Image (cartoon, coloured by chain):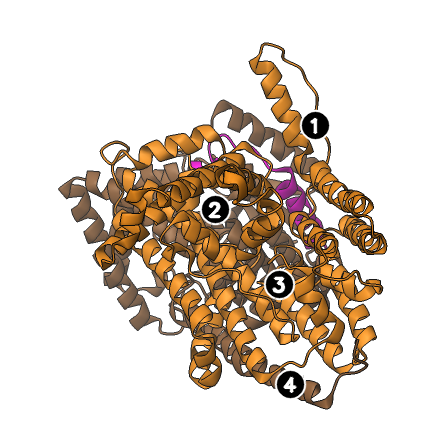
Amino acid sequence: MLFNTPLFLGFFALFFVLYFFVFTQARLRALFLVAASLVFYAGWDYRFVPLLVFSGVVDFFVAQQIEGHSQARQRKQWLLVSIAVNLGILGIFKYSNFMIGSVQETLSFFGMPVSLGTLEVVLPVGISFYTFQSMSYTIDVYRGETRARKDFVPFFATLSFFPQLVAGPILRAKQILPQIERFPQVTPEDVKFGFVLITMGLFKKTIADLLAAPAQTLFNGDGPLSWIETVTGVLAFAGQIYGDFSGYSDIAIGIALLLGIKIPLNFNTPYFALSPVDFWKRWHISLSSWLRDYLYISLGGNRNGRQIRNVFITMLLGGLWHGAAWTFVWWGAYHGTIISLTHLLRGTRVGQWLGSINLSAFRWLQWLFTFYLVCIGWVFFRAESLGDAFSIIAALHSPASGADAPPFAGGVLAMVALVILLIHCIDYGIVHRRELITRRYPRFVPLMILGLTFTFLIGEPGHEFIYFQF
Amino acid sequence: MSSSTSSSSRKTALYTILIAAVTLLPAMGLVNWLTRSAENNAGDIFGIQRIRSVTNALDYMAATEGNTALFIGSSLVKDGFSPRIFDQAVKAANGARVTSFNVGMGNMKPTYQKLLVQRMAEAYAGQHSKARLTLLEFNPFLVTDARQAFRPFMTEQIQAVLMSPRQVTKTLWEDPERFARLLSIKYLRHGVSAEAITGGIRFLVNQAQAQAPMLEQLTEDQLDHIQQLAAFRNQLNQYIRQQHPVTYKSHVWNPVTQGGLIDMMDLSTEARDLVVKISSQMRHPKAMEMDLQGRIQCCDIENLSFNDELIGDFLDTVETAKRFSQRVEIVLMPRNSDWVKLSPEGQRRLQQMLAHLARQSGVGIRNYQNHPAFDGDDFYDVTHLSMDQGRPLFSRVLAGDLAAVFQE
């Protein structure tokens, strides 16, 4: 059940009416939220509902055990149970075939070809999101940052909360559990901003679907392309993944707001970043902050002179989180490298001198270089294989080679660039002009109507969100 | 957990519903208005008008008294069969009075044909009548694997238009997602799906990109030829609009022409001259070569790798047609053998398929693919019969072959 389909509109309309007008008692409402979330999840594949419930039951139970023990060793053992179960689920469903394939390739490389077969497993939608979310609960309880809950219903309502269940943002139990437990009052400002987020999210998604075509021409096409088409394809994918994922996040956050649940924004004009470090503070914020808080800090953070090592490991695993393929591992390693280099540079005199330059022209250069680095990363992320990725990167840096540019190629490139800018303008408004939007809401209604009309009129309503595969 | 929701919470919920109504309803209204305007004013750009106008005319066809004949098929039938010439030729042959209808439509895969024929069966059942004869075109290149994969974005919208409300409702239990989509296409969007609009834009951009280099390779003579053709067409359209203000829209099924297109007999001498010029200009070797390549790409027209699902749908279509027609026959339209040369494999497959269809359907097959009466000059492109020669000729040949049916 995709957000951008008439079915979801019908589902949410029915849910909304029942939620506010029938299930008015808090406990019933929490139960109803769980039931609706399970129906929503079953809409993808009902076979994986037990897996979601299992993950929730284990962590609910483990959190109580952690809190119930005072000895550090026992608390740690129970935490390891939670981590082992969640990573075990991920390992089986997401990484088993990747690991088998990698072993086969490695053995084959060393002249020992073996056939280990593959497992017949289907990747449950949203598994990477809800396992991470569930784990954050037990880790928070272990760290004493939140207390273990005695009531399973609100805990599970949090874990299975349908607006963000299948593709995030990844929530922390301490952020959302208290809200679900008391169902805070929805304010008119929440409603207004929620609608803006939903409308703009749908609009971004539609644009992302349109950008899919030039990206596919580059990454899935079979003919030789001109340099300008290669540039267009890379830029189009940068725009597609941003519009697609930030659109999904905005819709999820907007829907939650209509229910009075406040979820932090997940994107903040990422392509306006001035360094790779800055980019990760603006892109998929819920994941990057999760990795920072639960992985990077657990590895030691920037203590003991191990910052570079820890950054690299964190980004490498962050890449692997996205998908079970070497292209994602490379993407993670690539970002680990450029972030590490940024940190190293900052520690040098040259870096400090560069940091002291206060010229707008220099900031433009910083921005351009960061955007270039991020786009190179997207090639690894999107390419079918590492070989393809390196070929595309080589073509990107060879303007004189490749086929002749077809007519309108320059126009298509300009359109793609404009569209990326448009998505950023929307994002900027959402992040920085919330107060203005809610205060002068009637002025934005015509824009929202036009945005919705555009979304309904064109696009591909059945087109899945890219991050569902993760 | 707090115990219950306050009344102010419910007020905010009502406020939410109000805002949803204020934004969603105008947006839906705009979509409705835009799709309707596009449908009314932009010609049949989404390939749906003819289909919808045919479905609207089903009761009219079923209510027509006397000997009626339906010819259901693709654009080859739409362009290549004149009901009025056919009726006159039957009458001239043996004095039998018949009213035939052209039910040819572009993009008519058997999947759609099957649904259309189901609607026809309902219309005839509602009128307690039966057609004397139903001809079902079997178009070999529309039942190939390649064609099945061609323009997938058209599928949902054509099916939404052709499905009955009951069939749409049935999808609710099988695939709720699809149910909601079909509902929206059928009742909110005038049969025009979002995918069709997007797909159409992409298709046009791709075509423009593909054609532009070809245009660069064309000689001045060839470019002059294209410009001249466009000028002739504009002129002819103006004539037709002036002379037939009601029936000029070829993409709208019209009872005056019995579903057929404007014929030569409807036109003034000047307009007829233009038609002849246009047909001749369209047969320019370069244009024919490009058209043939297009057909090879989209439809596997030479090798004919048949698609089992489409063949199954065609056989279902025949079975359904038997319910509302006293006699059902399968017809293969003439092939432009000057251009379309079946490969040995294609020939073998076609022969096997015709034997299979005859066996499975139990109805007669009239195969005009290699009929000696037709040559390259009877077509305006590699597949369609021309208005000035091919269409009247085929209509008369068919009438000659079928006249006896109406005398029985």
Dot 1 lies on which element? loop
Residue at (60, 52) in percent of width and height: A293
Q: CA distance from mark 2 to mark 1?
A: 62 Å
Residue at (70, 86) in percent of width and height: B10
- Of A344 and B193, which appears nearest the observer? A344
Task: Look at label 4 and name its amino acid.
Answer: Thr
The residues colored magenta run: B296-323
Check the residue under mark 1 and report the chain it is in.
A
For the colour brown, the matching chain is B
Task: Look at label 3 and name its amino acid.
Answer: Leu
Of the two numbered discs 1 and 3 in the rendering, the one whose residue sits closer to the viewer: 1
- Evaluate if marks 3 and 4 touch, with contact meaning CB atoms under 8 Å apart: no
Earlier sequence position, callout 3 versus callout 4:
4
Dot 2 surroundings within 10 Å: few (below 14), some, or many (20 or more)?
Answer: some
Of the two numbered discs 3 and 4 in the rendering, the one whose residue sits closer to the viewer: 4
Instruction: Give the dominant element type of the magenta stretch: helix, strand or loop.
Output: helix
Task: Report the residue marked by disc 1.
Answer: A118
Task: Report the residue marked by disc 2.
Answer: B397
Check the residue under mark 2 and report the chain it is in.
B
